[in-house]
Each structure stands twice: as structure tokens, then as C-alpha cells.
């Protein structure tokens, strides 16, 4: 038998899966890790934490599945995007990685806008930079930690770090490179114009390659650490957004994927770059070298429900422990028993700034219209509905530009039938649930390796490979109620944007 090993290196943990050549999982393992917040608006992770989790989950999944290292024909990755990690020539981190959630570089973002006109930036990238973006963060390191910037042989991200640990090569796939803001998305080369004006030498960036490129073989050192066979083929893989599109089955033009994980996004595969000049919606490279992804990202989706469980969910945790099930299944049952609309309670899921369709690192979450009539169960359902409203807002911004033919769902939140029904009711669109929604990114990474291996001719050949578990159609009686609440949801930001800025401006 022949198998593929894929790693999904996320924000909350790393998942290792072993699949057959068709992406069907035969074994999996997960190890959790956390995020450090040294200052207000900062978010960092030590890359050694990623690697430790990768080593542990590789060993565990190989043993639990009974798969021999000799039978692994390829390795690939899905990785969190928008990280900034300075490393030396040996790939050793010079500081913790500044991850996608971090918003420290607002000052540097404004410097970029002043150097280049907003019109020029929007025409090239569709969005203006914020304190959460890669170029401002690199500039922050240069300005605030000049010795580290000077010592840095390369400035890489999560995916490139893992590729180097496996192979010794500094390579980054086009999807991850395209979100930096330094890649010319048409030519798919680093922009010497932007990097030169901003004082960011292109020599400090990795070589950008296709997601399906065979980067190298597993090094002797990594083979000893993980138990894998030295020389096993390693493919570059791609960013989690690109991988989830593949893992959801949304591989053809105008097919969409809704992802509900710690963060979330609505993404649509397109045949050519699409520029939407407002709303923080970007076009990035797809795993498929011949296609693109139009993506709107929200910073906090499942993270909102996790926050409630961690901070206020004592009753639900106790119930989950008693029944031996996940706290999220308890949330589902509670939410299902509450009338749609949660008695007009609105939750804004903007817990740590936002990207789309509002590009604002200062915005925050909250309950609006909370009254003495509301109970815990209303708050739980309102959180889920708030994420659904925000998904609808992102979807609306995208559909102002292009049509969407179908919509699949992946991510941990997509395991919830209750949540997917809410999204269908709020958006007025049918939502298809993938059979393994929690594994969308890792399956996408494995199938990317399968294309690289020649098992599939191209990414279009993957259409129909991903099985679906269910279909959720909008219910008209709920659609009418949600339409009113959705419009009021959008008005919350309009009314409070100035207040958020006053309270939360990042350092």
C-alpha cells in the first residue's frame, strides 16, 4: 500500500493525518498549543512549539495507523498564513513568530500608504495594508528590532519553517507568498519596486514555488526525530486557505468554501485575479497554479465560542464532562433549543480586530441589545448567529463582484448541523457539509501532494473526490427574521467604529 502524510499546522495546534492516494484518512493525531500575547494587540508563537507538535503527532499517527515509513510516498503541509519569522542560515528562529492575529504594526501600515497612493495599492492588491499584514510587521522588526533584522538570513512564515525543517530548503509556496503583499501576483515574482522603496531586501525572502513542487527529501536528522524514512519525498504544500479550498472540493471556478475554524473565511476559486477595491477582500494564489482564490477572512469565528466556553461556560463544561462529549456538542443542543434570532440579541464576533469586509484592527466583539429577558442559552446561540451574520456580510461583498455557483463548508465549526443551518438561513444559500469538515486543510494538503505525485492529472480532476455528508437549505420563515437582524448587525459597526478606535488602538 502507498500513503501520504500531511500536516495541518494551525493556530491552536497541529494535526497529522495519513491518507490513501485518494485523500481518505486512515489515521490522525492532534497536539494542541497556545498563543502568547506579550502586549496589547500582540500575538506570537515559538516555532519550536510547532515542531515539537509535528514530531509528536508524526510518531503517534505512524504507530496508531500501523503504516510503515516505507509506505509513505509523499509528505505535504497546510499552514497558518501571514506570519513573520526571522531565521538564521540554519533556519533557527531569531525571535518568536509574529502570527496573523497580531496587530502591532499599525504605524508601519500608515507609512506604506503615505509612500504609495491608496489608489495604486488598491489597484494592485485590492486592499490597503493594516497593522495585521506582513509588510508592516517586517517593517516593525526592522524599525524596533534592528539587530534581529540585520542578522536575519531569511524572513519566513510557518509553512516555510516546516519545509526547511523537513528538507533543509528555504521554499515558500505561491499562496503564502501572495499574502505577503510583496509578490507581483500577475508575474508571480517578488516585487523589487515595493521591496526597494520600503527597504526590504528581496534576498531575505524564500524562493516562491508551486504547492505541488517536490522540494526535497526528508533529512537524516528529521528522519531520526520523527521515525520517517530518510529521503521520503516532501512537497511544498500551501497555506491553510488554499488547502481548505482543495479539501472542501471547491476546486472549479465560482465554487466557494466557507471555513469555520479558530478564524474563518469565505473563499471562491476564480480563473483570474479579481480586484475588489474596498472591504479588505483579497485575491491570493490557489494551490492550483492556474487558478486564484478570492477570499474574505474573519479573525474570530470558532474562537468566539471557545472564549465563551473558557470564560463563561462552567455549566456547559460540567455537562460535557458528565456526558463524556465535547462542549461544542453541548452548545449545539442548547442553541437548537433557542428560537432563531435569540430574542433580538446580536453578538458581534470581532474579538481581535477584523480583516473583511471591515479592515479594522481596533474593532472588538460584544453583545448588543442584551436584556433581563436573556439567558445563557440566548448568548450561546447569539454567538453562533453573529458568526453567521459576519459570513453573510463577507459573502455579500464578494457577490457584488462575482456569482457563486455552490458553497461547501469545512473547519471544526462545520461539524455543527445547527451552525450550518443558521448560515443557510442567514445567507439564503444552500450549504453542503463535507464528510470530514475538521480535516479539510489536511486532506487538501494530502491531495496537493497527490497532484504533485501525478496520481491526479491536475486539481480539476479532484472534483467529486471529496464526499459530502449533508445539505442545508435555507428555511424561509427564519430567513425573513434574520434579514432584519442582519441589517442591524451591520449598523453596529457603523455606529461604534469611532469608539472602537478610541478604546483599542494598537501600540
Image (cartoon, rainbow, N blue to C red):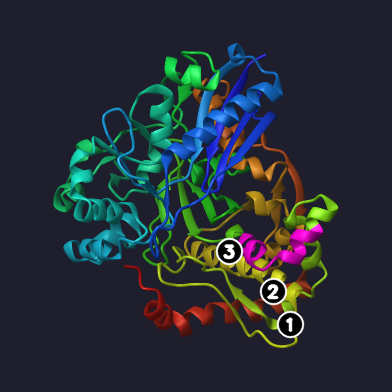
Dot 1 or dot 3: first in sequence order is: 1
- Say which element carries label 1: loop
Q: Pointer 3 and pointer 2: residues touching (CB < 8 Å)?
A: no
Side (left or right) of 457 relative to 175: right
Q: Pointer 2 and pointer 1: residues touching (CB < 8 Å)?
A: yes
Magenta residues? 304-319
Image mark for residue 374 = 1
Q: Pointer 1 and pointer 3: residues touching (CB < 8 Å)?
A: no
Q: Main secondary structure of the magenta part?
A: helix
Residue 246, by quadrant, is: top right
Estimate the spatial distance between the alpha carbons at disc 3 and disc 2, rounded to whole Å.
Answer: 18 Å
Camera sees residue 172:
yes
How many residues crowd around disc 3 within 10 Å: few (fewer than 14), some, or many (20 or more)?
Answer: many
Q: Which residue is mark 3?
A: 391
Q: Which residue is mark 2?
A: 379
User: Does 285 appear above or below 483?
Assistant: above
Q: Mark 1 against mark 3, which lies toward the viewer?
A: 1
Image mark for residue 481 = none
Estimate the spatial distance between the alpha carbons at disc 2 and disc 1, rounded to whole Å.
Answer: 7 Å
Q: Position of residue 326 (x, y in %)?
A: 75, 52
How many residues crowd around disc 1 within 10 Å: few (fewer than 14), some, or many (20 or more)?
Answer: some
Residue 110, by quadrant, is: bottom left
Residue 310 is covered by the magenta coloring: yes
Amino acid at each position: 500500500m502507498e500513503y501520504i502524510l500531511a500536516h495541518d499546522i494551525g493556530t491552536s495546534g497541529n494535526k497529522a493525518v495519513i491518507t490513501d492516494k485518494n485523500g481518505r484518512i486512515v489515521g490522525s493525531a492532534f497536539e494542541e498549543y497556545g498563543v502568547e500575547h506579550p502586549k496589547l494587540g500582540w500575538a506570537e508563537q515559538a516555532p519550536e512549539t510547532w515542531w515539537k507538535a509535528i514530531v509528536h503527532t508524526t510518531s503517534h499517527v505512524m504507530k496508531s495507523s500501523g503504516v510503515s515509513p516505507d509506505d509513505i510516498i509523499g509528505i505535504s503541509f497546510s499552514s497558518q498564513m501571514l506570519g513573520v519569522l526571522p531565521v538564521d542560515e540554519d533556519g533557527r528562529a531569531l525571535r518568536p513568530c509574529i502570527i496573523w492575529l497580531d496587530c502591532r504594526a499599525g504605524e508601519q501600515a500608515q507609512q506604506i500608504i503615505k509612500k504609495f497612493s491608496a489608489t495604486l495599492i488598491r489597484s494592485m492588491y485590492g486592499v490597503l495594508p493594516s497593522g495585521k499584514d506582513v509588510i508592516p510587521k517586517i517593517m516593525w522588526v526592522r524599525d524596533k528590532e534592528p539587530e534581529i533584522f540585520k542578522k536575519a538570513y531569511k524572513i519566513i512564515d510557518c509553512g516555510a519553517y516546516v519545509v526547511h525543517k523537513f528538507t533543509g530548503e528555504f521554499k515558500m509556496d505561491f499562496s503564502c507568498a501572495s499574502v505577503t503583499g510583496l509578490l507581483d501576483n500577475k508575474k508571480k515574482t517578488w516585487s523589487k519596486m515595493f521591496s526597494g522603496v520600503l527597504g526590504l531586501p528581496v534576498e531575505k525572502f524564500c524562493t516562491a514555488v508551486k504547492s505541488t513542487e517536490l522540494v526535497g527529501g526528508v533529512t537524516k536528522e528529521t528522519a531520526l526525530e520523527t521515525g520517517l524514512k530518510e529521503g521520503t519525498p516532501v512537497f511544498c504544500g500551501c497555506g491553510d486557505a488554499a488547502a481548505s479550498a482543495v479539501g472542501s472540493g471547491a476546486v472549479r471556478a465560482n465554487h466557494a468554501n466557507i471555513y469555520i475554524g479558530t478564524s474563518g473565511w469565505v473563499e471562491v476559486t476564480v480563473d483570474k485575479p479579481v480586484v475588489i477595491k474596498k472591504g479588505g477582500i483579497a485575491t491570493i494564489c490557489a494551490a492550483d497554479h492556474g487558478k486564484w482564490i478570492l477570499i474574505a477572512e474573519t479573525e474570530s469565528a470558532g474562537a468566539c465560542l471557545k472564549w465563551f466556553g473558557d470564560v463563561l461556560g462552567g455549566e456547559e463544561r460540567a455537562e460535557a464532562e458528565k456526558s463524556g462529549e465535547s462542549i461544542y456538542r453541548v452548545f449545539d443542543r442548547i442553541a437548537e433549543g433557542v428560537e432563531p434570532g435569540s430574542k433580538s440579541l446580536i453578538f458581534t464576533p470581532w474579538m481581535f480586530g477584523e480583516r473583511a469586509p471591515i479592515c479594522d484592527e481596533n474593532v472588538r466583539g460584544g453583545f448588543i441589545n442584551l436584556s433581563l429577558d436573556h439567558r445563557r442559552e440566548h448568548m450561546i446561540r447569539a454567538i453562533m448567529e453573529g458568526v453567521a451574520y459576519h459570513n453573510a456580510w463577507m459573502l455579500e461583498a464578494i457577490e457584488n463582484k462575482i456569482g457563486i455557483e455552490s458553497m461547501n463548508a469545512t473547519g471544526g465549526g462545520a461539524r455543527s448541523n445547527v451552525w450550518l443551518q443558521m448560515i443557510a438561513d442567514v445567507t439564503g444559500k444552500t450549504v453542503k457539509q463535507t464528510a470530514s469538515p475538521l480535516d479539510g486543510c489536511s486532506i487538501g494538503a494530502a491531495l496537493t501532494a497527490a497532484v504533485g505525485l501525478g496520481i491526479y492529472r491536475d486539481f480539476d480532476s479532484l472534483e467529486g473526490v471529496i464526499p459530502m455528508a449533508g445539505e442545508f437549505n435555507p428555511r424561509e420563515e427564519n430567513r425573513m427574521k434574520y434579514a432584519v437582524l442582519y441589517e442591524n448587525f451591520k449598523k453596529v459597526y457603523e455606529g461604534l467604529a469611532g469608539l472602537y478606535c478610541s478604546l483599542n488602538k494598537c501600540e
